[in-house]
Amino acid sequence: MKLSDSFKFNTVQGFKFGSSPFGKPLMFVHMFFVDGLLIDTGHYNMRKEILNTLQQLNVQQLFLTHHHEDHTANAGLLSQHFNCTVYASKKCAELMKHPPKISFVQQLIWGKAQAFISVITKDDYIETPNHRFDIIAAPGHAIDMVCLLEKNKGWLFSADLWVANRIKLLMSAESMAQQIESIKHILHYDFEVLFCSHNPQFSNGKTCLQQKLQFLQDFYGQAAYLYQQGNSAKAIFKKMNLKENKWVKFLSGGELCRLNMVLSVIRDEEQKRSKKRSLKN
């Protein structure tokens, strides 16, 4: 089933797209358009619906928040249709040349990742006739992820930094420690509206991120403590009374699962130990 919707907040137009081979979509992807700027391009399985919905917009420039397929898959299609420049961070531009392989379940829901090389790198800010958006690095969910902040309006285009107050799984490459630091950094800025790519919040955006931060810190602290006591990842998983979505884990080949949350903590803790050893030497 494929579903789409649109909405408007202030001068920002939002577009919501979701697809699923098994009934109603469980997660939607949002794209945002403001003052000639289109932020992200949605996933490949919805390319026809996205083009039909957006084709009358006056898109002057396009920005990609990170390389994941549900944010970048239609960059080529839309940039060609609108004859516009595509901007992204330097890290994102490099990854877009050869996007990492994605799991079967991600391909089933989103579609295949699409390479795109015609990207102009931007790591400081992007301007439109009436707005300036500061580009703020926010790695963790993806190494190249950034947020866009419009200070005068209190808008944060947060990509996948928030999504929900609590999370139930991670991808294998995600870093929980980096996510914690990224949220802490973003919370130093003033904003009210959270234009989240999967779950926009038009008020109390900062509170939402604070609640997500608290959840991550609590989880990380408990898992790290158990690891320091000599427990394995599976033992930590059991002692924290965590439960796995076995179907998601199976269909993704372990790329998407709750155990990855524990494995991320262990990996992050090992990196901290390695840095400490290096400093001593």
Image: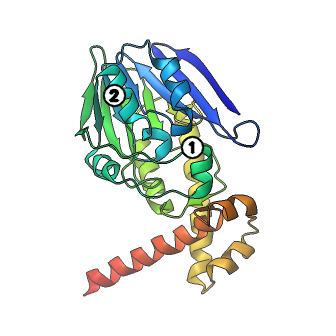
130 relative position to 108: left or right: left
- Asked which secondary structure carries label 1, the reply is loop
Label 2 CA crowd tier, 10 Å (few <14, some 14–19, many 20+): some
- Asked which secondary structure carries label 2, the reply is helix
The residue closer to the viewer here, 152 or 90, is 90
Place of residue 159 in the rendered image (x, y in percent of width and height, measured from the top left):
47, 39
Residue 169 visible, this orientation: yes
N-terminal of the pair, mark 2 or mark 1, is 2
Spatial separation of the CA atoms under disc 2 and disc 1:
19 Å
Reply above or below: 43 against 169.
Answer: above
Residue 148 visible, this orientation: no
Reply above or below: 180 against 191.
Answer: below
Q: What amino acid type should be assigned to the residue bearing mark 2?
A: Ser
Q: What amino acid type should be assigned to the residue bearing mark 1?
A: Trp
Which residue does the numbered mark 2 point to in the structure image? 79
Which residue does the numbered mark 1 point to in the structure image? 110
Confirm or deny contact between disc 2 and disc 1 (CB under 8 A): no
Quadrant of the snapshot with the C terminus: bottom left
Asked which quadrant contains residue 28, the reply is top right
Quadrant of the snapshot with the N terminus: top right
128 relative position to 216: left or right: left
Place of residue 37 in the rendered image (x, y in percent of width and height, measured from the top left):
35, 22
Res. 138 mark: none
Asked which quadrant contains residue 237, the reply is bottom right
The residue closer to the viewer here, 131 or 173, is 173
